[in-house]
Image (tube, helix red, strand yellow):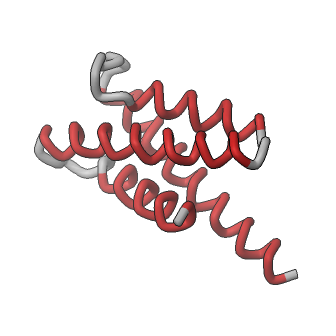
Amino acid sequence: MAISIKLILAISLLICLFDMPYGYYQFVRLCAFIGFGFLAFKSYKIEDNNMLILYAGLAILFQPFYKIALGKEIWIIVDLIVGIGLLAGLIIGIIKTKR
């Protein structure tokens, strides 16, 4: 399930790089908040504190209740870095399991 969440979040965040309606960005913020919150909880359960801190921080950054105003250019960079990071993590995880 975590793989699916990471893949969906990565694709959603990379779609944010295109000119989309504002409602899409709000929807992605809500989904990212829920998804990263779930990933943080799973990291807590397996006692992976580094990933717990990362996912909790991302959940706070993307939370939809109090918008963090970074400006469009910064949000594009954040979306790109987080989307690519999620995809890279998935690829590395797949490579490690095939060894």
Examine the rendered structure and indicate whether residue 53 appears above or below residue 30: above
* Horizontal side, residue 28 vs residue 82: left or right: left
Q: Nearer the viewer, residue 36 or 75?
A: 36
Task: Tell me which residue sits at (51%, 58%) in the image.
Answer: 6
Q: Position of residue 10 (x, y in %)?
A: 46, 56
Task: Tell me which residue sits at (32%, 38%) in the image.
Answer: 29
Residue most extreme to the bottom: 98
Q: Nearer the viewer, residue 13 or 50?
A: 50
Q: Quadrant of residue 90?
A: bottom right
Task: Tell me which residue sits at (66%, 58%) in the image.
Answer: 89
Residue most extreme to the front: 45
* Horizontal side, residue 50 vs residue 65: left or right: right
Q: Position of residue 86 (x, y in %)?
A: 57, 54
Examine the rendered structure and indicate whether residue 57 appears above or below residue 43: above
Residue most extreme to the right: 99
* Horizontal side, residue 42 vs residue 24: left or right: right
Q: Position of residue 39 (x, y in %)?
A: 57, 47
Q: Quadrant of residue 52?
A: top right
Task: Tell me which residue sits at (40%, 42%) in the image.
Answer: 34
Q: Position of residue 15 (x, y in %)?
A: 31, 55
Image quarter (top left, top right, bottom left or bottom right) of the C terminus: bottom right
